[in-house]
Amino acid sequence: MRNIIIILSVFIIASCGTTTNSRYAMRHDKAPTRLPTADEIIDITPKYEPYSRGGNKDYTVRGISYRVMKSAVGYTQEGNASWYGSKFHGHLTSNGEIYNMYTLSAAHKNLPLPSFVKVTNLNNGKTITVRVNDRGPFHHDRIIDLSYGAAHRLDMLKSGTTRVSIEVLTFTNNRSPLTSPVIAIEIKKNCLVQLAAISNKINARQKINQLTVIHQVSGQLEQAGQLYRMQLGPLDNYQQCQAILNKVTLNYPKAFIKTI
């Protein structure tokens, strides 16, 4: 009887170990043994979808906090894209779906889930639309993690990463596309983006200097009593200001466009 109990105990412990580590059975991600089929990477049709119940709260990974955008209307971004494959295939995505590396999906740190995003490979001009349903990539120098199938369509599997631009495609709840989420005509010739107002002039100057380098625009401080308003610009037109606003909103949620 004692031997039976010992055997059962060993079996239970072994089973728990397997269950706990099953998601990480593959230590490093890798490509699958085959390429996606034509049916698997067929173009997807963007449409209105309500945001999922899962994956849309602010979160922390490796000690870094990330804020999920409440709205992505007009959002654009440029940076490096990577791809992820076999290690995560068949496991849950951040919004509770099953990750299929052969379809056209993606992960983003801040976009609402799900979101439809137009991705352009800036090295070869190839463009696809992906459905964002996961979180990542958690590297400071990457903006989006593409599925294996999406990376195949963009011809970036060999390089591993590539420079891309992304544009969120937004629809209203009556399924009408918001084809021009940003004002399409230049109704304001000059404007700037005001980020915040703080009382420490030295800190304000340091921050605005950093942001002018990051976003490649001019910047300035505007004194208002005991406060110093941090501003990016002036810029030539409203579209440029809106593009900058989209990029800084995550760190400066109260930022706004100020016309001159």
Image (cartoon, rainbow, N blue to C red):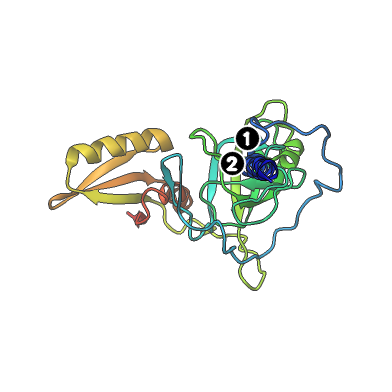
Which residue is more in the foreground, 162 or 32? 32
Dot 1 or dot 2: first in sequence order is 1
Q: Residue at x 86, y 42 (%)?
A: 37
Tell me whether circle 1 and circle 2 mark residues in contact (CB < 8 Å). yes
Residue assigned mark 1: 82
Relative to residue 72, is residue 28 depicted above or below?
A: above
Q: Residue at x 73, y 43 (%)?
A: 101
The picture places residue 194, in percent across and down from the top left corner, at 32, 51
> What amino acid is at disc 2?
Ile
Q: Quadrant of residue 156?
A: top right
Relative to residue 79, is residue 76 depicted above or below?
A: below
In the image: residue 175, left or right of residue 34? left
SS class of the residue under badge 1?
A: strand
Residue farthest toward the right in the current orientation of the protein: 38
> What amino acid is at disc 1?
Ser
Relative to residue 70, is residue 159 depicted above or below?
A: above
The picture places residue 61, in percent across and down from the top left corner, at 47, 43
In the image: residue 143, left or right of residue 194? right
Relative to residue 51, is residue 164 depicted above or below?
A: above
Q: Residue at x 48, y 54 (%)?
A: 68
In this view of the protein, can residue 216 be seen by the observer?
no
In this view of the protein, can residue 58 be seen by the observer?
yes
Q: Residue at x 82, y 32 (%)?
A: 33
In the image: residue 191, left or right of residue 57? left
Q: Quadrant of the C terminus?
A: bottom left
Q: Quadrant of residue 123?
A: top right
Residue farthest toward the bottom in the current orientation of the protein: 174
The picture places residue 148, in percent across and down from the top left corner, at 73, 38
Q: Quadrant of residue 169?
A: bottom right
Which residue is more in the foreground, 138 or 161? 138
Mark 1 and mark 2: Cα distance apart in space = 7 Å
Q: Which mark is residue 144?
A: 2
